[in-house]
Image (spheres, grey):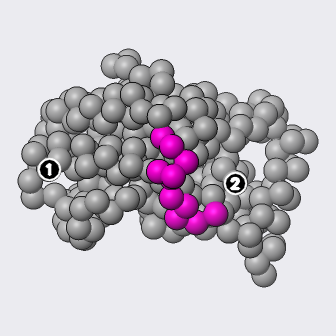
Amino acid sequence: MNEKGYESLCRKCLPVVRKASEFIKGEVGKVATEDIEAKEKNSLVSYVDKTAEEILVEGLHELLPEAEFLTEEATVDQREGEVRWIIDPLDGTTNFLHSIPHFAVSIALEIKDKLVLGIVEEVNTEEVFCAWKGGGAYLDGQRISVRKNDLISEAIVGTGFPYSVKDSAPMLGILDYWINNARGIRRTGSAAMDLAYVACGRYDFYYETSINAWDVAGGAVLVQEAGGKVVDLENNEDFLHAGNIIASNGHLHDEIVKRVSEAYTAISS
């Protein structure tokens, strides 16, 4: 598939993503306590996540019948394949369940282990971020790019808090550095949106550990096509299954990778 093919497919995916987003928005405030499951301490799920995923799987399968799926809620068989959709039906479930208006639908397409298409829709604002290989990144149809800032002192940092206790000490150490040296820190509870914000220049960089492929796949495409860089903590581009991620505007990339990686390496060594 070439650039035009990716663009065409991306546009066909938008109504599928919108359908899932509209379903989620209609369920805000309706989920009863007994409908919520705890997958682990800080990871919640409800029928909303699962139904939204089913909507996405059905629609995307119709568009690309040969594709396999990697999804957060495993409502469909999880298989590896040359062509695969990676889906987070509701990124920011805790926000959703507490009616905090910041959560998103995220999808990505992977072909031969390379991400080639990504869509992230923020459910509340209905902002739609999309990107495809070689075609750039867009917000509501307008081209976007990362912020051209090379100063930590002027940077807005996005991050997430780890589920793993072992990651809490380095997290606190590096947060202290940002507090004293960066312009501001944001922790909003949606990795997909954090990455979208790097892509459109609202954040200068974002990093997180204890992360899954479906959390970051769609947003990573946005950052890459908007001119940024995405790696794991060891500065490798094979970030998707590393369990951690650093996404930057590119201008601050080397310094960010150095400081974040050193913080985590110092604790674990």
Q: Is residue 180 above or below residue 128?
A: below
Where's residue 123, x and y in %?
44, 29
Can you see residue 250?
A: no
The disc labelled 1 sits on which kind of residue?
His
Name the spot of residue 150 as percent of width and height, x first: 70, 35
Q: Residue furthest bottom?
A: 269
In the figure, is residue 154 to the left or right of 228?
A: right
Please determine whether, in this image, residue 124 is positioned above or below residue 257.
above
Confirm whether residue 213 shows in the render. Answer: yes
* Callout 1–callout 2 Cβ contact below 8 Å: no
Q: Amino acid at mark 2?
A: Phe
Residue appearing at x 47%, y 34% in the figure: 30
Residue drawn at x 82%, y 50% as measured from the top left: 175
Name the quarter where the C terminus is drawn.
bottom right
| Residue 231 x/y as whole percent | 53, 57
**Side (left or right) of 263 relative to 27:** right
Give the total of numbered labels. 2
Give the CA separation, mark 1 to mark 2. Answer: 34 Å
Res. 74 image quadrant? bottom left
Dot 2 lies on which element?
loop
Task: Give the residue drawn at x 48%, y 21%.
Answer: 125
Residue at 25 percent across and 44 percent down: it is 56
Crowd band around label 1 with a 10 angstrom C-alpha radius: few (<14), some (14–19), many (20+): some
Earlier sequence position, callout 1 versus callout 2: 1
Q: Secondary structure at mark 1?
A: helix
Residue at which label 1 appears: 61
Q: Which residue is mark 2?
A: 161
Region in magenta: 31-41
Residue 34 among magenta residues: yes
User: Mark number for residue 4?
Assistant: none
Tell whether position 258 is magenta: no
